[in-house]
Amino acid sequence: MSDELKKIRARIDAIDDRIVDLLSERAAQAQAIGHAKSGAKYRPEREAQVLRRVTARNPGPLPSPVLAHLYTEVMSACRALEDGISVAFLGPQGTFSEEAAIKQFGSQALLQPCASIDDVFRQVEAGAVLYGVVPIENSTEGSISRTHDLLFASSLRICGEVLLPVHQCLMSKSGKAAGVKKVLSHSQSLAQCHEWLNQHYARAKRVPVVSNAEAARMASKDAAAAAIASRTAAAVYGLKVIAGNIEDEPQNTTRFVVIAAHDAGPSGKDKTSLVMSTRNLPGAIHALLTPLAQHGVSMTRLESRPARTGRWEYLFYVDIEGHQQDSNVAQALAELGEKAAFLKNLGSYPVGMV
């Protein structure tokens, strides 16, 4: 070993010693905060501020998403020194929902898989877990209807969002392209890989199931089946990847929301989600959105969905920039409440990081 290499390794060892000391000091301070405050140990706005600050300070060479992941794990480990955080997600193990939950809460969170999106809501509403992570929309295939319906009906709030790049893989027991007679996956994933399947497996039957991970589990027991799921699911269920990154849109991203009995405080870069309906008057939609423009509130999403209360009646799901405690947002919401036939604030929360 050269003298130069020895010197570099010695410097790395010294840096590691400093990192261990600083991590221990940080954990002790986190414990002190936990003892000093009451209520929830997880504050979405504070953790968002920490991640933004450290990534803004990042000089490289580590990419900012990697640095954010490391700090998420540090915060997750510090929370676990107390009682930890319980989180329900759409299971089983190996789903993209699980990946989103780990991205948001870290690997030290107490993760609980649920059989359906409804079950995630029920677990949080019953107090069996503190938080839930559910998909709400995909950049390619649009909104998740069931999540929207449950947000409308539930008293739970949105306290965070997670943006997860989604890379789909085709996998089977053998890992061979020949012999695949049916392809199993969630309906959204089948749609996201529609053109690729047309080109490579046009004759294979496409079978929608409750989740990608369930598709992987089923494929692990059926030699004629292949599943579309994540590489994590392949590892969990002992499958071999036939082809990777088969999604039709390379920038394919799924947005998840974190649901809880509370929303988040202002973080400095926030979003507020609403659901509303209009009165049956000419120009009602324009009038409904006017308060946002008058108070300088930017709308980032507007989607209509049929209401279940009658024919040809619609609910409008809207995302706006800012927190409900921001003065301009608060004024706009007050005026919206006067103009709308129905208005529900689903929560304010930090904007998710890619």
Image: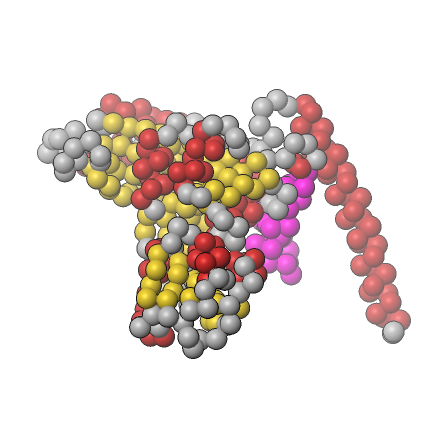
Residue 62 highlighted magenta (yes or no):
yes
- Where does the N terminus fall, quadrant-wise? bottom right
The location of residue 83, given as percent across then percent down, is: 65, 32
Residue 195 showing in the rendered view: yes
Q: Main secondary structure of the magenta part?
A: helix
Q: Between residue 134 and residue 38, name the one nearer to us.
A: 134
The location of residue 39, given as percent across then percent down, is: 58, 24
Q: Between residue 42 and residue 15, name the one nearer to us.
A: 42
| Residue at x-position 77% and y-position 48% | 19
Give the left or right position of residue 97, taking residue 85 as reference: left
Give the left or right position of residue 292, taking residue 324 as reference: left
Give the left or right position of residue 159, taking residue 40 as reference: left
Q: Between residue 205 and residue 277, name the one nearer to us.
A: 205
Residue 69 highlighted magenta (yes or no):
yes
Q: Quadrant of residue 202?
A: bottom left
| Residue at x-position 11% and y-position 31% | 281
Please state the total of marks drawn on the protein image: 0
Q: Quadrant of residue 301?
A: top left
Is 142 drawn above or below residue 150 in the view shown? below
Q: Which residues are magenta?
A: 49-78
Residue 354 showing in the rendered view: no
| Residue at x-position 52% and y-position 58% | 233
Q: What is the residue that sits farthest to the bottom in this orientation?
A: 178
The location of residue 60, given as percent across then percent down, is: 64, 58
The location of residue 21, given as percent across then percent down, is: 80, 44
Give the left or right position of residue 62, taking residue 303 as reference: right
Q: What colour scheme has been applied to the protein in the rendered image? A: secondary structure
